[in-house]
Amino acid sequence: MIAPALTPALCLLNPHAANGRCAALAQPLREALPQVPLVLPENVAAARRRLLALPEGSRVIVAGGDGTVHQLLPALVARQLQLAILPGGTGNDLARALGLARMGWREALAHAQSAPATTMDLGEITTPEGGAQLFMSSLTAGFDAAIAIRAQAAPNWLRGQPRYLWATLNEIGRLRVYPLRIEADGQLLHEGPMLFASSLNTPSYGSGMPAAPGARVDDGHLELLRVGAFGRLGALAMMPLLLAGQHLRNRKVHLSAFKALRLTSPRPVPLAVDGEPLPSSNDITVRVLPRALHVVR
């Protein structure tokens, strides 16, 4: 479904995105959008309140990264708002999937005001510890979730993939595998030790790693990336393959589409959605929500 372009009702800028560097866009955006309210919310709750107060179907420009959009998903979906992104985070995997990541902010702003909106799928994870949460790019479970959590403690001067590589090298020293039972669309896919089992909606995660090269955000399903038990050297050797999109050649790596997934484990598994940590859990349900979000590509 494609909706016509609308005049933006609001421009929301996350001043904390990219470790505070996104805040530099505030004054240029005020000058470029004199008729559009610019909001720098104090916190997530304030940002969601502003969005929930908008008329249903309004267009919203969001300056920030994957973490920013992730926090706004409940309000965007509830009001069926049209999301137009100005990429300004450290990850930007959703912007990559929408073809926006290489745009400068002026080009992205012009596009946000003129291009029509279409729909994309979302994912939903449910656990006993955290309830239900939406995600638009990835749900990581296991080693790669531990990396995403570790990346949040990386030095501020590290951005993009170097930030995740730093986290990976630090996490390999305490490498763990997880005994997982994986059921997808009612069929048992795996039972035994795994490094991780992650669900992707976008082709990349972790700031551009092409983990699911054929993934599409509008095909009605998610992609399950399963990586078997590796030792430290094997996990380290996988990194250049993953960065080059050649990881699927390894017999321990599998990619498959699904609509509904359940992961169970005797012990809690680290989790992160769109790079944001979640409470660990040993009972995880994932499903796709087709055409749940309106976006400008």
Image (tube, rainbow, N blue to C red):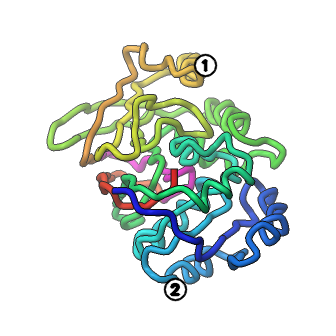
Q: In the displayed structure, would residue 203 be above or below residue 33?
A: above
Q: Which mark is residue 240?
A: 1
- Say if the magenta span includes residue 277: yes
Q: In which quadrant of the rendered view does residue 164 lie? A: top right
Q: Which residue is drawn at the image coordinates 40% and 75% (left, top)?
A: 78
Along the polypeptide, which appears first: circle 1 or circle 2?
A: 2
Q: Position of residue 233 (x, y in %)?
A: 58, 17
Q: Which residue is drawn at the image coordinates 46% and 53% (left, top)?
A: 136
- Say if the magenta span includes residue 134: no
Residue 49 seen in render: yes
* Span highlighted in magenta in the image: 263-278
Q: In the displayed structure, would residue 250 be above or below residue 145?
A: above
Furthest toward the left, the residue is 186
Nearest the eye: 89 or 148: 89
Q: Nearer the viewer, mark 1 or mark 2?
A: 2
Q: Position of residue 210 (x, y in %)?
A: 52, 30
Nearest the eye: 41 or 227: 41
Q: Position of residue 85 (x, y in %)?
A: 60, 57
Q: Amino acid at mark 2?
A: Ala
Q: Main secondary structure of the magenta part?
A: strand
Q: How many marks?
A: 2
Q: In the displayed structure, would residue 56 be above or below residue 222?
A: below
- Disc 2 target residue: 53
Residue 42 seen in render: no
Q: In which quadrant of the rendered view does residue 250 lie? A: top left
Quarter of the image with the N terminus in it = bottom left
